[in-house]
Amino acid sequence: MASRRSFVKKSISLVAPLSLSTVTLKAIAEDVSDALLTLSKTDSSRMNNDEELWARLAQAYTVSPSILNLNNGGVSPQPKVVQDAVDRYYHYSNEGPTYYMWQILDKGREPLRRKLADLAGTSAEEIAVNRNTTEALATVTWGLTLSKGDEVVMTKQDYPNMIHAWKQKELRDGISIKWLNFKLPVENADEFIKGFVDATTPRTRIWHITHMINWTGQILPVKRLCEEARKRNIISIVDGSHTFAHLDFKIPDFSPDYFGTSLHKWLCAPFGTGMLYVRKENIAGLWPLFPNDKPQGADIRKFEALGTRSFAPEQAIGQAIDFHLAIGSKRKEERLHYLKKYWCEKVMQHPRIKLNVSLKPEFSCALGNFSIEGIEPERVASKLFSEYQIHTSPIKWENISGVRITPHVYTTTKDLDRFVDAVLKIASV
């Protein structure tokens, strides 16, 4: 507990903004560390609606007071402890780049790998540090050896970069994509299982599974899907961009063959940080995206042969993990689901407003999506920002049309009351 308090207090006070005095910053650090200490001592279910406590924790972030950011699903802000770490590592690197970057900071990847593996519940020898989900899953898409006519099953609700990658492989290598198209929200896990199974033929080699669909927040039954894939000797690739450090799980809970995620989303790590998981026995057979001297070797590090990159964001992932653990994975998930349910239950009472996401915790968490009858999503999002300074994300993709709302742990119910009031006014015009 003492180390938890010391970590937050010390880190927040390291680099003070010009607008805050040292005394003020120290007080904020004390308040945040006390809030984290209280969280750690209390059962998670009792903390969901403690607004005073979460408001104190929100001081760890430096988000703008001028806008209400409800688009954390795109990329999340970092708490100050992480921002300060990036600054320290960056300035340290500039004292002698080729020495401090390659001979000092680069050595920090192994402890970081172990720290990420511990959070993911895997072996450190199965974790590669990279820049985002796109890079992680592109490594898998282009690293797998497939033959002409081999089939990949995926959905039209998957993330565009993953769709583009498989379409390019289809054009280049002659594989075939079997498309599923779900009408969301879905509150029956069997519907997803049936969709993937029915699309499977003797030529099916891969199931590309999105753990949480970014457009609406729909959660797929990834454990069951990976189990079904394994029964059929089919490779399971899981896009965990929106679930890692958002939902409380370990990767072995559903045992995929491959898993990729972006750490700059729900972990609140520095921008441009990500992670690739490859099951140990699959490493040797997966070609790296950026070749090294042993492309068919069984060392997970072959997927990190990127060349020169900034070591500062990479090393600051460690501080993001510390902050996440200080809150607690389960507490974080339950608070995020509480916030989503809070605003959804208020706006759904309006006859013109439709929710495009389930309220059940097994099918959704922080991400939500709503639409207003007769008003295009772009218009709703535009009015929210121009008239109420609320930043959201309008969605028009396949059969999905609505506005995506994604609060984070620094979002308060007072913030959401402001949002709800604005939505109801727009819908009532």
Image (tube, rainbow, N blue to C red):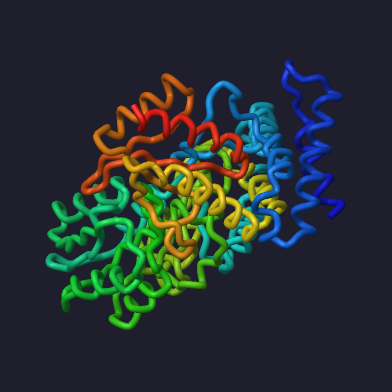
Q: Nearer the viewer, residue 369 or 11?
A: 369
Residue 27 occupies which quadrant of the picture?
top right
Residue at the location (63% across, 63% down)?
118
Q: Is residue 123 above or below residue 34?
A: below
Question: Do we see residue 197 in this rendering?
Answer: yes
Residue at the location (16% across, 78% down)?
202
Q: Position of residue 167 (x, y in %)?
A: 19, 51
Does 306 sit left or right of 12 as displayed?
A: left
Q: Is residue 19 above or below residue 427?
A: above
Q: Nearer the viewer, residue 366 or 14?
A: 366
Does 360 sit left or right of 249 as displayed?
A: left
Q: Nearer the viewer, residue 215 or 319?
A: 215
Residue at the location (51% across, 67% down)?
251
Q: Nearer the viewer, residue 305 or 37?
A: 37
Furthest residue in direction bottom, as rendered: 231
Q: Is residue 411 above or below residue 140?
A: above
Residue at the location (16% across, 56% down)?
170
Quadrant assignment for the N terminus = bottom right
Q: Position of residue 186 (x, y in %)?
A: 33, 62
Residue 392 occupies which quadrant of the picture?
top left
Quadrant assignment for the C terminus = top left
Question: Do we see residue 100 in this rendering?
Answer: no
